Amino acid sequence: MRFRHLGCLFTCIQLAVASLALSQDCTLQIEGLLTDDHDKSPLSYANVLILETGKGVATGENGSFLIQGLCPGTYTIQYSHIGCTPKTMNVDLKENIFLNLQLEHHTELLQAIIIESRSFGKAISQAKGELSSEQITKFSGKSLGQALESINGVQSLQTGPTVFKPVIRGLHSNRIILFNNGLRQTGQEWGSDHAPEVDVHMIDKITVMKGAGTMQYGVDAIGGIIIVDRGRLSYQQQGTGKFQLTSMSNGRLVSGGIDLDFPIGTKQEWAGGFQASWKRGGDFKAPDYHLTNTGLEELNASIALGFERNASGVELFVSTFNTTMGVLRSAHIGNLTDFENAISQNIPLFVEDFSYKINAPKQEVTHHLAKVEAKKWFRSGMLKAIYGVQYNGRKEFDIRRGDRNDIPALSLALWSQQMDVSFHHHSENDRIHGTLGVALNFQDNTNDPETGIRPLVPDYTKIAPGIYLTERYESAKFIAEAGLRFDHQKLKVFRFNEMNVLEKPIFNYSQFAGTIGASFLPSNVVSYALNLSTAYRAPGVHELFSEGLHHGAASIEEGDPSLSPERSLEIQGSIGWNISGSVEFVSEVYGKRINDFIYLSPLPEPRLTIRGAFPVFQYSQTNARLWGSDFSLKWQISKGIESMTNGSFVRANNLIDQNPIIFMPADQLSQHFTYQSEKSEKGIAWKATCSMDLVSRQSRFPAGIDILPPPDGYQLVHGAFGINFPHRDNEVEISLRVTNIFNTRYRSYLNRLRYFADETGRNFEIHIQYLLSKKKSHNESF
Amino acid sequence: MNHFKNKISVLFLISLIGLVFSSCEKDDPVPVNEEELITTVRITCTPMPAGETVVLSFVDLDGDGGNAPVITGGVFKSNTTYDVGIEFLNETSVPIEDITEEVRNEGQEHQVFISPNGGIDFSYAYLDSDLDGNPIGLEMQFFMGAVSSGQLSFTLRHQPKKSATGVKEGDPTNAGGETDVEVLFPVSIIE
């Protein structure tokens, strides 16, 4: 069975390589100089990209660039720099040419690329948030979920100090799609203690689409889409590299990472990349006690190999993610009595001295991914095909009777395959862009009967073909976009009924999703965007067939096979206001109606079992309404000093019983002050940041369901200091960070272990980074 | 020529997709053999020196969910001491699996607690001990006092802290650990 998948992969690689058309000799080159429109100073580390071929280079220190190996023809050259609106120009290439290019440069934006929904520049009508390579680096040694939390409107559903599951505007799990290097990441997304299986060290760019208005990725992104990418291979640029070392006091965590990108050979046709990271931490510490059994260990690696010639390219990407994470020992409970007993303690029941040892309860998760991507550029478009295979293995170990602690209580293997073929086109004048694509996904989920426990979710296979079309018109002051997608899903479940007889029900779902939106940029001062979208999500297997005890919550969860799909209708708008050149305000507002919203509803009668009586929750449907806002204010106080304020709130109601929806993020506000020094003559620059998070108490929750009311609000203060300086041709960056400076005792409403223990206390962190040829800190536009 | 090559590619692609997705017919899963299931708790109480044996039992043959469990309470004689033996069974397996032995072998990790509810005049003492000399509770003595009625709450705790205050004496308050069994038996004491 497993070998069949491998066979598929190899055939695909052969196919992709074979489909590369070989053609005539191309030796022309474009040389040029990129300068600032205002003061004519050279713009270094700017990006120059030929859209038709995807070939790109970064400009050197003196603003010069050289692109070689071009065939005669007409090309669109796009050139961009941080803080500038990208420009394009058309070139009819018959012989080697030299170009003088200018960009209008806003130095005030150069100071930092702040995480925000950028309404200026690359406008889309839907709100989004981005993290650049530089920002992601700060989360070295942490998890993807923690990095995502720095995007306004994104929080985490936590399970202790190591498991962070992203929540976008109050929605999570199967309502969010994660795209990992062009593949839809598949894992056991349904579990609230299942974090995304992606290593932050592997990623150069994160984009979060806050809503369903992007049709390339799927019909079911009711909550939003997270896109992570490793960045472009260095075909033309010189090789780059990054070495990172992080150490944290809390958990005595150590983490290291290496990341290399390099051209292979001298013909600028082959390029490769290698990345690996490792991390190990022990028990984290709350202000007053150790969080016993919260250690973790992680080992990840990825390899990329690419070949580009003329107007075609093939890339191969393979990654592996392996982690073992302990779950707080005190959170392991057998029944409601234990739960109540645990809650009544001031200090968790199991507190031991610090240890790196990870005992049961724990999770062992692996995720392997392999993909091959082939591209062919045409005069007015690009054809792209992707085939990928993923394997996700999840084993959860419980404290069990007998010698069964080493036998997983949950053991799932999920194989998935994906095939996407898409055609991107753009008009001659570059005003109209569009994509037509087909996608095919296949999943095969298997429980290993080794557990000796009736599985929580049954085995299944899922096949889901889809087709989509998006179009976009863009002029200097106006952008309009629309998209449509149709998906079908056939789900076949393999389930044992109460008599232990195998049943194989089949569920077919098919539906449309669509989006339409526009942005107006009447002046440099204001921008508006409006987007309307509708999405659709078929019930997940856990919602149809879950059965059994949820250990962390001492409750029984039951599926309902008669559930129908959810349908959402969302409207979102945003205003960007560049008040005075030094003050920029962005406000995003959204409203969402979800019909047949699937949620866990309590049944009136508890169920009597041998472990006592448990409350029973059944997956049910209602109509829900969510609305809220994310807003940010950036103020350049004076040269080098910047203030950034972010805030978000969400309101969610069950429209049938009029109650608030449970486990919605509380209102929050964060404030950052940053001072960034100028580079000294020796090239030394430093940066200091002070930030504060304010989180209020969630006062909107349905009565009588949760065993404890939401915890009090809290405020946390963090600080950071970083310095960077050149070392030969390379760059060294050293930063020190302190989180939770005042060692504040607090509990977060969205942490599933808040019943048992406080959040982590003060943490000192040191991060050392060595950048070979100043890798990537300035080329995130690719 | 190029056209031809394209056609071949497309054909190849289509056949490949067909191959990939058709080869994924799934084998039937095998049912899980639930090893840890406890379906039955049986408490056999023999009055000293002689008299009628009382058996308290909890039986849930289809495990959690499905049919409700059957709970059998008991009537005890006042001012009487009972010798008590406790059994845990998995009656779904063939032959019936006696889990009592597993609990006894892991005696250091288990302890039974009983607490009276609703005014029953009841107390108990442990008769057995684990390798550390701490009680397990598979063998006990019940002391039935004056005429009264109420419930006995029966708990089997996994990984209790036997060294914590009161735990050895039968008070689960500070025991921690995880509850494997918790059952309420209706009982009464008559003349």
Image (cartoon, coloured by chain):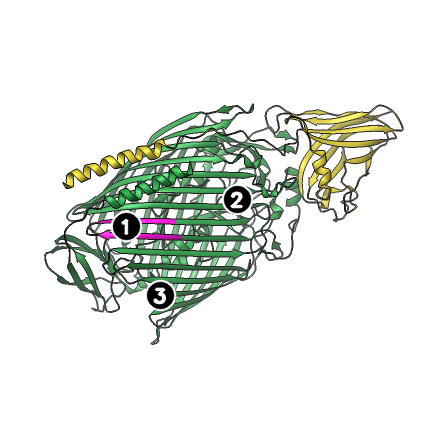
Rendered shade, chain A? green
User: Mark 2 falls on what kind of element?
Assistant: loop
Near-viewer residue (B105 or A601): B105
Occupied quadrant, residue A28: bottom left
Q: Amino acid at mark 2?
A: Ser
Relative to B147, is A404 above or below?
A: below
Disc marking residue A699: 2
Chain identity of mark 1: A
Inter-mark Cα distance, 3 to 2: 50 Å
Question: Is residue A438 something that shows in the picture?
Answer: yes
Q: Residues within 10 Å of mark 3 (few under 14, many from 20)?
A: many
Q: Measure how far apart labels 3 and 1 are at the Cα level.
A: 33 Å
Does A751 sit left or right of A220 as displayed?
right
Label whose residue precedes the other's in the sequence (2 or 1): 1
**Sequence order check: which comes first, mark 3 or mark 2?**
2
Label 1 sits on residue: A123
Query: Does label 2 lie on the same chain as label 3?
Result: yes
Amino acid marked by disc 1: Ala
Image spot of residue B54 (x, y percent)? 80, 25
Magenta stretch bounds: A302-318
Q: What amino acid type is highlighted by mark number 3? A: Leu
Question: Label 1's element?
Answer: loop
The answer to the question of whether label 2 and label 1 lie on touching residues, with beta carbons closer than 8 A, is no
Between disc 3 and disc 1, the foreground one is 3
Query: Which residue bears the numbered disc 3?
Result: A772
Looking at marks 3 and 1 on the same chain, the residue that comes earlier in the sequence is marked by 1
Residue at 29% x, 60% y is: A82
Asked whether residue A471 is in view, the answer is no
Give A743 or B182, whichever is nearer the viewer.
B182
